[in-house]
Each structure stands twice: as structure tokens, then as C-alpha cells.
Image (tube, helix red, strand yellow):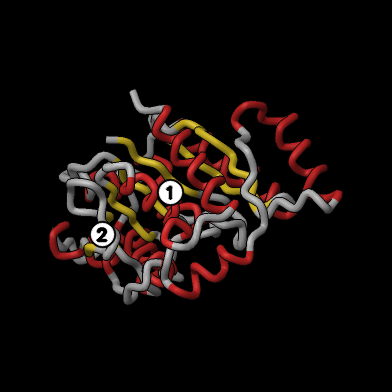
Amino acid sequence: MITIVIANQKGGVGKTTTAVTLAHGLALQGKGVLLVDLDPQGQVSTFLGLPQESGVFDLLVTRQPLAAVIRSTAIPDHDRNGLLVIPGNSRTATAQIVLAAEGFKLDCLARALGAVRTDYIIFDTSPSVGLLQEAALYAADWLIAPCAVDYAATEGLTGVLTTLQAVKEQASNCQLLAVLPTFYDELTRESATTLRQLTYSLGDAVWEPIHRATILRECAAEGLTVFEKAPCRATQEYAVVVEKVLSYET
């Protein structure tokens, strides 16, 4: 099983779009996938056309069993149960408060999901540094950091990489798999400059960019992923992300 955390300490960089699209893409390749929404905004459910629920709170605070908090989606894979979700909502923020009061332990998320048997677990995280982001980094094998090609987003990237290093000092094995440039526009100087700076700093860890696309906003509003829409450049670009993730399987 491979666990991937999608994180950047800056909002509006395409974290949820990337988490949902990657999860769907892996499921379409016949992989079992559990997508866990650790962001109090609960937008994973919105992006998949599902109701927001307090699944993460119920799992971590009231200690409900996995079977009680996992939800199926209408997205099938080839021969398994399809894409599964542990949803979140505003009570996820309360979960962080309660966990802190009870004596937060970095391995709380890893322990809660210890009985999961699937090919991939994917965490969508809040842009705010917090206990659940740290717990997700601790539990994960890989970090994929979406980063809009602008200065503010690169500051958020620096923040999450700093947090990753701190978590690794607590015996986490999580590694940076990729920085995924998002909202790329080849017509703007800022996009080209920021992408060049990212590549200079991080080398091959910077993957090919996802271009700015209206269809990605439409997908979120319609509760669909780009793989359920007519093929377009965004479909192709996220298909490449899925292929690259699969290529790192051992």
C-alpha cells in the first residue's frame, strides 16, 4: 500500500483538484483507492458530488470503526469497490482541537487507518499548518505539493517542505515525490519565471505543469472529475500525473 499526502501551506493552488483527480485516475487504472479529506472545508465531497459528513472527526475523536466512516462513490474501477472516501466537514477543525487537548500524537492517523487494505491512500489537507497536516505527513510515503506558479504559493511550498523535514525528524519515512506546478499560463512572465525558479531549486522533483483551465473549475461545480468530461488538455496533463505516480510503484 502506498500513502500519498497532497499539501501546500497556501490555499487556492489546486490541492483538492489534484487529490480528487489523482484518486479517480488511479481507480480507473484498476487500483483500490481511499481518499481522506483532512481539510475542514470538506471540498473533497463537493468535488465528488457527495454530501459533507464528519467522517474524519468520527474516526479520530469518537473512534468509530472504519466501516462506519468510509463512503463509496459512483466512480468505479475495473474490478474492485471503486473509489472510497472518508469525508470531512467543519468538525474536522474541532477534531484538531480535541486531539491537541487529549495529547496529540503524530501517529494518530496512521493508527486509525492501520486496518485499511487498499493500493493507495490519498490525503487532501488544509492549507493551514496544523496537527492533521503533520499527522498526514507522518503517515504518508510520498508528498505531492501542488504549487501555483506565483510567489505566494512558493512561500506555501517552502512552509510544507519545512514541516516535512520536522516530521521526518520524528521517524517518518515520507519523501517529496513531486512539486506539481498549477495554474500555468505560458502567456505570462510570472508563470515562466516561477516555473524556472522551482526547477532550478528542486530539479527533477518538479513535474510538468497543469495549465490554467476553466474546465477544472467547472468540474468542481458539477461534482465531476476531469476524467468524466470530454477529453481536453487538462485530462491529458492529469493522466500524465497518474502515469508518473504508477511508475514509482515498487
The residue located at (47%, 33%) in the rendering is: 244
Q: Quadrant of the N terminus?
A: top left
Disc marking residue 122? none
Q: Is residue 57 left or right of residue 233?
A: left
Q: Nearer the viewer, residue 150 or 225?
A: 225
Q: Which of 109 and 74 is in front in this view?
A: 74
The residue located at (13%, 59%) in the rendering is: 67
Residue 94: x and y in percent read 37, 70
The amino acid type of the residue labelled 1 equals: Leu
Q: How many labels does the image show?
A: 2
Residue 89: x and y in percent read 37, 72
Residue 225: x and y in percent read 44, 61
Q: Is mark 1 on a helix, strand or loop?
A: helix
The amino acid type of the residue labelled 2 equals: Leu
Which tag is nearer the camera, tag 2 or tag 1? 1
The residue located at (32%, 76%) in the rendering is: 51
Badge 2 density bin: few <14, some 14–19, many ≥20, Cα 10 Å: many
Q: Is mark 2 on a helix, strand or loop?
A: helix
Badge 1 density bin: few <14, some 14–19, many ≥20, Cα 10 Å: many
Q: Which of 74 and 12 is in front in this view?
A: 74
Residue 187: x and y in percent read 82, 52
The residue furthest front is: 230
Label 2 and label 1: CA atoms lie apart by 25 Å
**Residue where numbered disc 2 is placed:** 60
Give the mark nearer the N terminus: 2 vs 1: 1
The residue located at (47%, 31%) in the rendering is: 175
Q: In this view, does 167 lie to the left or right of 72?
A: right
**Residue where numbered disc 1 is placed:** 22
Placement of 157 over or under 100, stated as above or below: above
User: Could you say which quadrant of the image residue 196 lies in?
Assistant: top right
